[in-house]
Image: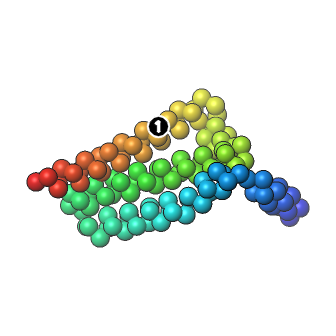
Amino acid sequence: MIKLNIFAMYFIMELSDLTFEQWFGILELPFLIVCIVYSFKTAHKLKGGVFGTGMTYLAWGFLVMAIGHLSMQITSTFGIDIFVWSLGQSLGKIVWFIALMITWALSAVGFYKIYDASKN
């Protein structure tokens, strides 16, 4: 219990020292979560098909992007890179790069499928 109280005090002290940019980055996260929820809901309502498949790819891309944004906010706010902390320096950087590529690849495939369906 004492360790938890010390952590809570440290956490509150860290939050009080945040810059405007850090607060802006943290406040971005709820909007990203809403975007993810509604992208999956939209994909589900489209029930497959070309548009639904494209939206599903976009939704998964948004989810991976949200994990990356959360990681960046933790790094910016607390100075802890969760990928490096959990996987080590080299592997953490590689996983970060792979996640970045997955985000853009899923988004690109999703947009392409929607584009391809809409031009016919």
Coordinates of residue 27 in the picture (x, y in percent): 60, 60
Residue 13 seen anywhere in this rendered image of the structure: yes
The residue depicted at 61 percent of the width and 56 percent of the height is 24
For the residue labelled by badge 1, is the local secondary structure a helix, a strand or a loop?
helix
Image location (x, y in percent) of residue 95: 52, 37
For this orientation, the residue located farthest to the right is: 2
Report x, y in % for residue 72: 60, 46
Quadrant of image for the N terminus: bottom right
* Residue 7 in sight in this render: no
Identify the image quadrant of residue 84.
top right
Residue that extends furthest to the front in the rendered view of this protein:
20
The quarter of the image holding the C terminus is bottom left
Residue furthest left in the image: 120
Give the class, few, some or many, for how many residues have Cα within 10 Å of label 1's Cα (few <14, many ≥20). Answer: few
In the rendered view, would you say 80 is above or below 36? above
Residue at image position (33%, 53%) is: 57
Q: Nearer the viewer, residue 109 or 89?
A: 109
Q: Residue at x 28, y 55 (%)?
A: 54
Q: How is the image coloured?
A: rainbow
Q: Nearer the viewer, residue 120 or 49?
A: 120
The residue at the point 57 percent across, 33 percent down is 93
The picture quadrant where one finds residue 114 is: bottom left
How many marks the image carries: the answer is: 1
Residue closest to the eye, 38 or 19: 19
Residue 119 appears left or right of 73 = left
Position of residue 98 in the picture relative to residue 29 (left or right): left
Residue 3 in the figure: left or right of residue 43: right
Q: Looking at the picture, does residue 98 appear above or below residue 60? A: above
| Left or right: 13 in relation to 34 | right
**What residue is disc 1 on?**
98
Three-letter amino acid code at disc 1?
Ile
Which quarter of the figure has residue 43? bottom left
